Image: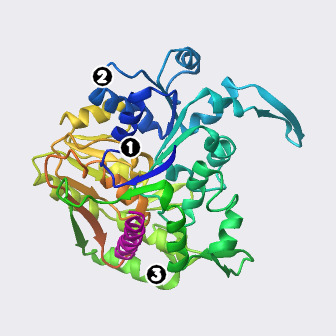
Amino acid sequence: MKHAYLLHTGYGKTKLCLDMIIKSKPKTLLISTKNIIETSWDAEIKKWYPGQLKYVGITGRIPESKRAAMLNEDYDILGINTEMLDWYIRNTTNVKRKSYTKQGIKLHYDTDELINRFDMLIIDESTLFKNSQAGRFKIVKNWAHKIANVIILSATPTPKNIENLWSQIYLLDGGQRLGTSVTQFRNRFAIAVPLPNGHNKYVYSQEATDEVLNIVKDITTSKPKPDVPQFPEPIIKKILLKPDTATAEILNRFKSDFIIQLQGKELIAFSKQQLINKVNQIASGNVYHKDETLQINDLKFRAVQHIISTKPDPVLIMYTYVFDKDKLLTLPGARLLESPQDFEDWNANKIPVGILSPFSSAHGLNLQDSECKDIIWFSPIWDTEIWIQANARVARRGQRYPITISVLLLKGSYDEYAFNLCQDKFKVQFNNLMKLR
């Protein structure tokens, strides 16, 4: 069996896999993020099949001295996070050959041993492998699709464009449907647009996108939303903040001149993208300058203080920059959510204000058991996949209350532009998923 389950967040992808595993208990390798390996699957197994499936999860948190013993345990499911794949292969397979490079001797391991070792491979959050040039994809490319049963799971399979699907489908069929390389995929479906730097940008027409989706229909199941809603849709609120006079002047001059003097420092943007990034940092209240951080205002911080003062229940705050995190952690009752114990305490309502990085914790966490009714985005983001996944940590099946998602946007910055662009990309991705139904 080779199949992609591209189901809306919170709609039972893990349970679906566990139902398959419990029938014949195939030796299963699970690959995903650290948080999913450490918390989600173990919790779901205990919830649905307590005592019936043996699960071993290995991440970098576990000392290397203990990992070998864990691998020798009798297990039904072995969970490995992507960062540990290289370690796992180096320590459990034989050297197939050696090659000599300028950097020295390179060992090539016999990954074919994994094909016979496991009856099933599950890749939870397959967009982890959407970049065909990334090292993590190259580690699994030659052997993953050769395992007898391969299942990939994702709610956001095409966060950028339809090209993201190539590497994920390759892990199922080895290139049978969409080509054996991303170059073949581009030659067949993309329009190459030359860039000034001599490289090409690849764009995809709606007709090409529809053709790709039609080709992979036989090995995909997609249901972005159920016909009957199983939980209330979140309410999304844009909270527009007016800058003070000093901040407004900084924003106007910087956007106009691409250069400004701040606290005796010369802040320069060398491109439009750098300008947008710096302006949105200023909108958050600080800006990075070389190896230091310059504080500009507390506009969003004061807005957060006001919002949480009116909320009797736990509030989850998403941050973008490190200086956002440091400032938010000064709020009464605030705690950074980063460890399994933090997540457990959050779901037990022991944390009044949870501070979460959407970039490091967007996938796989189940945080819906708390009494949280409010998510606050301190700054908007551009990444549609991260937006969907991060909100779905709370706004998902199993939530007990309607969720309000508030996004703080400073007028005169590029906050609103980033927010609108993210929402527009979300609509495109949703429409593509609908076509796979």
Q: Residue at x 44, y 82 (%)?
A: 253
Task: Give the label on residue 50, or none.
Answer: 2
Picture colour scheme = rainbow
In the rendered view, tell whether residue 360 sits above or below residue 68. Answer: below
SS assignment at label 3? helix
Q: Quadrant of residue 107?
A: top right
SS assignment at label 1? loop
Measured as percent of width and height from the top left, residue 113 is found at 69, 29
| Nearest to viewer (mark 2 / mark 3) | 2
Q: Nearer the viewer, residue 205 or 379?
A: 205
Residue bearing the label numbered 3: 255
Measured as percent of width and height from the top left, residue 294 is found at 44, 60
Residue bearing the label numbered 1: 364
| Nearest to viewer (mark 2 / mark 1) | 2
Task: Give the label on residue 194, or none.
Answer: none
In the rendered view, tell whether residue 432 sits above or below residue 121. Answer: below
Q: Magenta part of the protein: which range? A: 414-437
